[in-house]
Image (tube, helix red, strand yellow):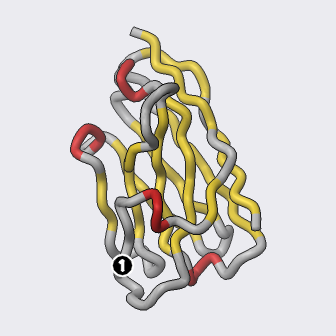
Amino acid sequence: VQLQASGGGLVQAGDSLRLSCAVSGLTFSSYSMGWFRQVSGKEREFVAAISRNGVNTAYADPVKGRFTISRDDAKNTVYLQMHSLKPEDTAVYYCGADGPKPGSNRYSRFAYQYDYWGQGTLVTVSS
């Protein structure tokens, strides 16, 4: 199983970025997907999640209204569109795959429930 995250980079406050996570080695449509982020010395924190049927999404309060998670099952890829980036969004962003578990509408905000992780992509937002 591989989760390949990409799209990170150095941007200025107020800019936008789109992260992608290409998944292989599992039945993508059977997994809910999530994005988490981590700053050195801190725990990995939830950013966004999407159910395996794409109907339900969830966001952490700090990113609500600025970030959008989506998935393309034809491409086995999950995306995180980020707008109005702030310096506090600076982190390594990880995608995770959760499942397969009962419930096509389920998703998880908890890192321990995710079965597979990508390698992370660094997002740096300068002020």
| Foreground pick, 24 / 74 | 24
Q: Quadrant of residue 31?
A: bottom right
User: Label 1, on which residue?
Assistant: 106
**Which residue, as the protein is rendered here, is positioned at the far bottom?**
102
35 vs 52: above or below: above
- What residue is at 30 percent from the left and 41 percent from the top? 63
Q: Position of residue 70 (x, y in %)?
A: 46, 61
- What residue is at 77 percent from the left and 73 percent from the top? 25
| Foreground pick, 73 / 98 | 98
Amino acid type, callout 1: Arg
- Looking at the rendered structure, the secondary structure element under dot 1 is loop
Please state if 28 lies on the left or on the right of 52 as rendered: right
**Which residue, as the protein is rendered here, is positioned at the far top?**
127
Quadrant containing the C terminus is top left
Please state if 70 lies on the left or on the right of 115 as rendered: left
Q: Quadrant of residue 24?
A: bottom right
Q: Position of residue 94 (x, y in %)?
A: 56, 46
- What residue is at 40 percent from the left and 61 percent from the top? 49
* Number of on-image labels: 1
Q: Position of residue 18 (x, y in %)?
A: 53, 42
| Foreground pick, 73 / 48 | 48
Quadrant containing the N terminus is bottom right
Q: Quadrant of residue 107?
A: bottom left
Task: Give neighbour class at mark 1: few <14, some 14-19, many 20+ (Cα, 10 Å).
Answer: many
- What residue is at 69 percent from the left and 64 percent from the top? 23
Q: Position of residue 123 (x, y in %)?
A: 54, 28
